[in-house]
Every structure is written in C-alpha cells, then in structure tokens.
Amino acid sequence: MDMDKLVSLCKRRGFIFPSSEIYGGINGFWDYGPLGVELKRNIKDAWWRDIVQGRDDVVGLDCSIIMHPKVWEASGHVGGFNDPMVDCKATQQRYRADQLYVFGLSAKNQPPTDFEVVGGTRKLGDWADFWVSAVGASPADAWETACPRAAKLLKTKPNRLEAPALAATALYMEIAAEDRIKILAPNADEPGTLTAPRQFNLMFKTSVGALEDASSVAYLRPETAQGIFANFKNVVDTGRVKMPFGIAQVGKSFRNEITPRNFTFRSREFEQMELEFFCHPEEAAEWYAYWRKARFQWYVDHGLKSDKLRLRDHASDELAFYSTGTADIEYEFPFGVSELEGIAHRGEYDLGQHQKFSGKDLSYFDEERWERDKAGLGHNSFKEYLKTREGKPNPGYPYQYIPNVIEPSAGADRATLAFLCEAYKEDEVAGETRTVLKFHPRFAPIKAAVFPLVKKDGMPEKADAIYRDLRKHFAVFYDEKGAIGRRYRRQDEAGTPFGITVDGQTLTDGTVTFRDRDTCRQWRIPADGVVQALRDLLEGGAIPGGEGS
Ligand code: GAP
C-alpha cells in the first residue's frame, strides 16, 4: 500500500487534515475531519467498552492534563525523558541524532520524507558505508562499541525502524569533534556545521498563574499513566475496587518530538489509551501473560488479521531496570515496522516512586488475602502478625504491599493509522478499479448509507423515511446525488459497510436492496425490517446469499 495514496484519501474524504493548514500547517499536529473523528472515536469507544465497561475489575478515570510538576520528577520524565538533539549552525535546522543517518544516506542530501529514502532497505552495510565515508571508522568496530544492541537488531531485524535510529543516535553520541567536522549537514554547503548532541527534554513546558518564574513551571503530560498512579489511593479509598484491579484512562498526551514524521505516527499531540492493572507481586507474571495475549487478540479481532501484526518480546537487555517483561504489539506500516502498543510488567516501580516523592503511603492492605490466611497463621489481628515480622524490610508482606503494575499502553492515533492502512484496498468491480476502506463494522464511521435509485417517483421520500428511522439507532448517511454506481464508490471510500437502496420494486413490494461493501453482493429485505437487519449485520450476522450478487 502506498502511503501517499492513503494520506491523499484521508485529506480528500475528510479523515485527517494537517493542523492549521490555511496558515501553512504546523509540524507534528493533525486534525481529524468529519469521517476521521468518527473512526477514532469508535476505536476509543471500543477500547473503553472492552477494557472498562465490559469487565468488573477495571474502573475509569479522567485526569487533568497539567499536574503538579513533582509528578514528573517522580516519574523520571524531568530527568530522563530526553532525545539527543543536534543543531546545524549554517541552516539553523534542528535534528534528532538518528535523523542525520537518514540524511546521510539520502543521495541528494535532502531532508527525506521518511525512512524509505534509504531505498526501501535499511541495511547495516548502507549505514556503515555512510559513517565510514564520513568519519573513517571501521564499521564493525564502530557498531560493536557504540551500540551492540542496535548492531544485533540490525543484523536480525533489518527492517525495524528503531534499529538504525538507535544505532545512529549511539554512534553520533560517540563521534568526536574532529570527526564531526567531516559530516555535511542536510542543505549546508560545507561540512562541519553540526553541533555536538545535547539532551533535549520532550515535555512541553508552560507556566501556571500570572507570574512566569521557576515556581510556576508546569508541563503538558507526556503520558496519561501518571495521572492514574497519582490517583491510586483516591480510587482505592472509594471502596469500589479490590486487588487485582485496573484503572484506565483515554486522553491527550504531548511530546515535543524533535522530528515528528510518518503522517500521524509520531505526532507532538496525540491520544493514549492506557490501562494500569494493579496486582499482587506473586500474581504479576500471570497477569502480564494475560494482558500480553489479550491485547494482541484485540487488534486481530478488529481486523488487523494479516501477518503485518506482530507481538515482539523485548530482549532482556532492552528492558527498563525495573521491568521483568515488556512486549510490543507492532504493525508493518508502509514506512516500516513499529510499535502500536506496549505491554509492560513495571513491578512496583511507579507507585514506589510516587510514595517516595509524595511521602504518602501508597501500600495496599489486601484484606481478602489476610482473612483467608489469618486462621492458618494463628493470629487474631494483623497488628499481631506485624509484631512477629519486626525488623524485616517489608513486614506487612504478603498482606500489605506496594502493588505491581501491568501496563498495556496504546496510542489511539497509531491504532487509527494502522486500521486505516490495513483497511485500504484497491480492487476491480465491474471492470473498474475502486478504492475501498474495509473497516471492521464496529469502527466504520458510517454504518450504512441510504440511496433512492433515482430522484423521482416517490423514491427520495421513501429513502428519506428509512434514513430518519435508521438515524435514531446508527450513524447513517443519505445521498441522492449522481449515478448510483458513483454513490456506492463514494461510500466504499468512506468505509461504509452497507448500502440500502430504494428502487422501483420498493414501491410495488415494499422491499429494499442491501449491498455489502466488501463483496458488492446485493439482496432484498422488507423496508420495515431495515433497523433489525442492519443491527444483525453489524453484530456479525452472515451476509445472505441473494439475488443479483
Ligand atoms: N505510559 C507508557 C507510555 O507512554 P510509550 O511507549 O511512550 O509508553 C505508549 O507510549 C503508546 O503511545 C505508543 O505505543 C504509541 O502508540 C503512543 N505514542 C507514543 N508517542 C507517540 C507519538 N509521538 N505520536 C503518536 N503516538 C504516540
């Protein structure tokens, strides 16, 4: 699938527009048009329905975007949420270190639109050649010393986006000033204009209140997760939850990405769908395995059925020091394979950090576990139990503990982009090529379109009545303009699963034609049964084999 075709369809049909386009746009920000807003909302609603409302062990939350700045000190974002940034003194352009790798490989030395400029491949050899010519390093040595993990990744998984990026960053960080002066920056006339890399914090800063000074500094959240941790105690105190349980949140996050790219894939403002699932440390491995599998299946069930969807376990040297397991759900986008969602076993790290920084006790007393065991332990009270464990590092354990966290963290925009890429098809219908978006019916922005075959003989009135009836239950669309074939094509491009046509026969026998988007098969049903028929089909009912298929 050609990414340019999808981007152009998204613009033309009102899925996604560049933000502030009439002023030339703003890099890394996107607006969802009339169809896009419905598509993304359907994805978020399905996630919420399946993760929160459809279960009895998860509750929801909606936190403020700006939080106390200490939250971000505790989470490690103030100190460690950085990317290495490089400036060009000649052009005043700013790059992430890994971007220079792509520029270096681009024949014309022009900023590429995406990683594909490397010629469709991202091979170790290409990459090493560039550095050899630029800095004279021996590739094998440079790789192995600067970034063994990236070197390994490149050899084993050469088409993963992160591998060259990781390696480029590592190598650029290693390059001494005398070698840097040999590199020609994109659009510069002479080599040697790039600065040493410096760490750039990705959080957007703002200030709260009328005075702008050090004490008013605040950040736009770079993830929704921390609002959940900061409210852990509040939610426990509501008394609605007991271990194990999850808290879910869907909302905007902001990252001042140095090089936003690949359409909405890496944006500066985006939406996350995050679940923090809290459990007893002894049950954490089991819950990690559960969520890893369940989240992968969710994408399959909603249409990412091709082998483009993968589940990749992080190697032990990729894991954060506090994590005992992380898996990425990855999708093979036209610009490379990259992450849709991460599922991480985060241990007690997050609540532990907030306990330390806030000074508030965030441990959980597991009453059920205590009640179950106390008789066997021979204690009447928990106080008595604690006495027997005096001097131990964690005396309340296993009844009082900092819960472990399993975190499935998904991006709503990346999911939307993956579902768009997977849905996009070009096929032949009646000798003509059509573009169709084969969305899962649950995600389709419009569930059915209603058409009068012609604009006369009472057909528009009848079709309009059917449309009004359907509109009470579903997102539907009415269209009477142009030839019926063109109207079908327009809805195929919008991803509308069903078409309902009022024709001459409707006026005599009261039936209408149903048309299936994917097979273009048609069949007739009584006009007064359309609501139920559409409901059955959207819920997965079989397409009837009918006349005129
Ligand atoms: N709380 C964990 C966390 O935020 P992450 O891997 O940084 O983990 C989770 O982000 C998800 O958020 C990613 O898998 C991706 O889907 C989405 N995401 C992250 N940065 C993004 C960006 N710049 N643009 C669009 N989506 C992004």
Image (spheres, rainbow, N blue to C red):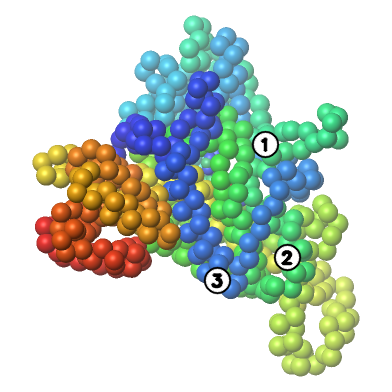
- Which sits in the foreground, 289 or 41? 41
Q: Is residue 59 left or right of residue 106?
A: right
Coordinates of residue 44 in the picture (x, y in percent): 51, 54
- Which sits in the foreground, 20 or 357? 20
- Which sits in the foreground, 303 or 109? 303
Determine whether 342 is above or below 162 in the image. Answer: below
Label 2: few (<14), some (14–19) or many (≥20) C-alpha neighbours in 10 Å: some
Coordinates of residue 282 in the picture (x, y in percent): 64, 73
For the point 64% across and 72% down, which residue is it? 244
Q: Is residue 277 visible?
A: yes
Q: Earlier in the sequence, mark 3 or mark 2?
A: 3
Q: Check disc 2 and report its element: helix, strand or loop.
A: helix
Residue under numbered circle 1: 203
Are discs 3 and 2 less than 8 Å apart at CB? no
For the point 77% across and 64% down, which residue is it? 233
Residue under numbered circle 3: 55
Label 3: few (<14), some (14–19) or many (≥20) C-alpha neighbours in 10 Å: few
